[in-house]
Amino acid sequence: MEDVDGAVREQWALIDADPARYDCYHALLEIYAGAQWVDAATCVASTLAFLKKATPEALAWLDQHRPPDLVAARQRLSDEALREQVFHPELDPVLTEAMGGIAERAANPLAHYESFFEPNHSLGSHSISP
């Protein structure tokens, strides 16, 4: 186990120095797969696939170990279900409700602000073009 931990630390140190060292990601995949650290190996294989740097072996690992797709929610959880099944029992419901309202109002202007930078956003007689 110490050999695995040391090998992992070594590869991550190299990646920290140069994140584009894809050979280190491939080495991590081999180390994790050899140690049967399935989740870690799957994460590395997914990263390589996303970066378009996966070998056929990495893609095969990913195909064999990919977690199932999440099922989309059909409806919003009720406030009661959130309180009873999701939120920590020590959360103050009044404070949580207040913070939720603040977060919703704070996020709304940000959404408008981001749309300002879309190509050809109208500024009356002016426009922003790429």
Image (cartoon, grey):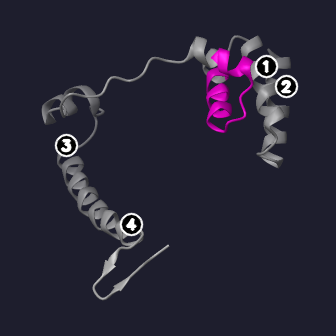
Residue under the image location 19 percent in, 34 percent down: 76
Residue bearing the label numbered 4 = 114
Please give the name of the residue rendered at 29% of the width and 68% of the height, measured from the top-left corner.
109
Residue under label 3, please give it: 93
Circle 1 residue: 31
> In the picture provided, is 89 more to the left or to the right than 43?
left
Q: Residue furthest bottom?
A: 125
Please tell me how crowded label 3 is: few (under 14), some (14-19), or many (20+) other residues with Cα within 10 Å. Answer: few
Q: Residue 7 shows which numbered tag?
A: 2
Looking at the image, is mark 4 or mark 1 earlier in the sequence?
A: 1
The amino acid marked with disc number 2 is Ala
Q: Residue at x 79, y 23 (%)?
A: 5
Q: Foreground: 104 or 129? A: 129
Is 108 located above or below residue 36 in the figure?
below
Looking at the rendered image, the disc whose residue lies closer to the viewer, 1 or 2, is 1
Confirm or deny contact between disc 4 and disc 1 (CB under 8 A): no
Q: Position of residue 79 (x, y in %)?
A: 15, 36
Which three-letter amino acid code belongs to the residue tagged 3? Pro
Mark 2 Cα-neighbour bin, 10 Å: few <14, some 14–19, many ≥20: some
Residue type, mark 4 in image: Glu
Q: Nearer the viewer, mark 1 or mark 3?
A: 1
The span picked out in magenta is 41-61
By secondary structure, the bulk of the magenta-drawn segment is best described as helix
